[in-house]
Image (cartoon, rainbow, N blue to C red):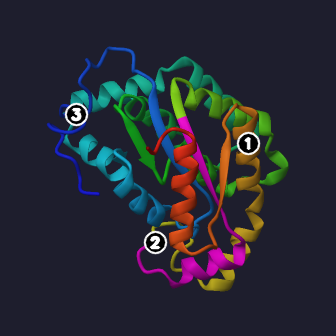
Amino acid sequence: MAVLNPTTKAGNSDGQARGLGATPSRLRLVELFGVPGGGKSTLATELAVHLECLTRNDISARWAMLPIRKKGAHIARGLFDRRTAIAAIGFAKSTRLTSPESLFRLFRLVAKRDWVCRQQGTVLLDQGFLQDIWSILYEAQPANIRTKAISRLVSALYRDIDPSFLYLELNSDTAATRIFNRSDGSSRLDQLPEDKIRIRLEKRNWISQQIVLAAIASGLEPSVLTAADAPERVLDTALARLKAQGVYP
């Protein structure tokens, strides 16, 4: 999907027809979630052909065009959103986050919420809030994780949002092979030997499981897709699920 002209399909250069101080209307969010190698980016590209939506690249392009002052306003509103900030702090304490990278990712997640929520229409993300949480927990120990802490953060992040959550389920062996053989990946697992990728994914199987349980506990209804299927079948299944949810006509 080509990057939208910020003055046409989806509004003005700030990404909104309404003023920056206005309360965002309810956003329709289609989010893809799963382990690296699950085919999220590939599926997002195909879905964007069928859905009238903004993609992650569209939103990033819009952000790049914003004046510094407006970027600062969005970041400040995100960071000073009381409910999300409290949930994020509780999440960090409960999971005993100590990695500077994980803490920075959590900070960035909270900071960007306002910008995402102020988009109009339907947004399709292959690296959304749930995927951010997966990356944040990458260095965490499973014994430290409480589903309730994740659930509270998910509830805060997704309030005032109407989400459709597609979970691409994939075993570690297939995911490792895909990551090792791809040439355009951007995860921290790329460039590692295949056996090391597999070991790391197996040690982190619990992350996806905990996030899915937390999402369900917070009221989200995950729709599970078998990512090992042929891409055409995964796309057809995704479109059928989105049609049933009223996203795809």
- Which residue, given by chain and number where applicable, does mark 2 sit on? 185
Magenta highlight on residue 213: no
Q: Name the residue under label 3.
A: 68
Which of the two labelled residues, at mark 3 and mark 1, occupies the earlier sequence position?
Answer: 3
Compared to 59, does 174 lie above or below?
A: below
**Sequence order check: which comes first, mark 2 or mark 3?**
3
Q: In which quarter of the image is the N terminus?
A: bottom left
Amino acid tagged 2: Gly
- Say which residue appears at 59% left-offset and 20% top-offset: 83
- Camera-near label (2 vs 3) is 2
Q: Is residue 102 visible?
A: no
- Mark closer to the chain start, 2 or 1: 1
Contact between labelled residues 1 and 2, with CB atoms less than 8 Å apart: no
Q: Residue furthest top?
A: 22
Disc nearest the viewer among 2 and 1:
2
Residue situated in front as seen by the camera: 245 or 138:
245
Location of residue 245 with respect to 207 vertically, above or below: above
- Which percent across, then down, holds residue 85? 57, 25
Which residue range is magenta in the image?
163-184
Give the crowd class for mark 1: few <14, some 14-19, many >=20 residues within 10 Å: few
How crowded is the residue under tag 2: few (<14 C-alpha within 10 Å), some, or many (20+)? some
Q: Say what amino acid the circle numbered 3 marks.
A: Ile
Element on which disc 1 rests: loop
Q: Is residue 85 left or right of residue 61?
A: right
Q: Left or right: 151 with respect to 88?
A: right
Task: Specify the farthest residue to the right.
Answer: 143
Residue at 79% x, 44% y is: 145
User: Which residue position is annotated with label 1?
Assistant: 96
x and y percentages locating residue 35 in the rendered image: 62, 62
Q: Nearer the viewer, mark 3 or mark 1?
A: 3
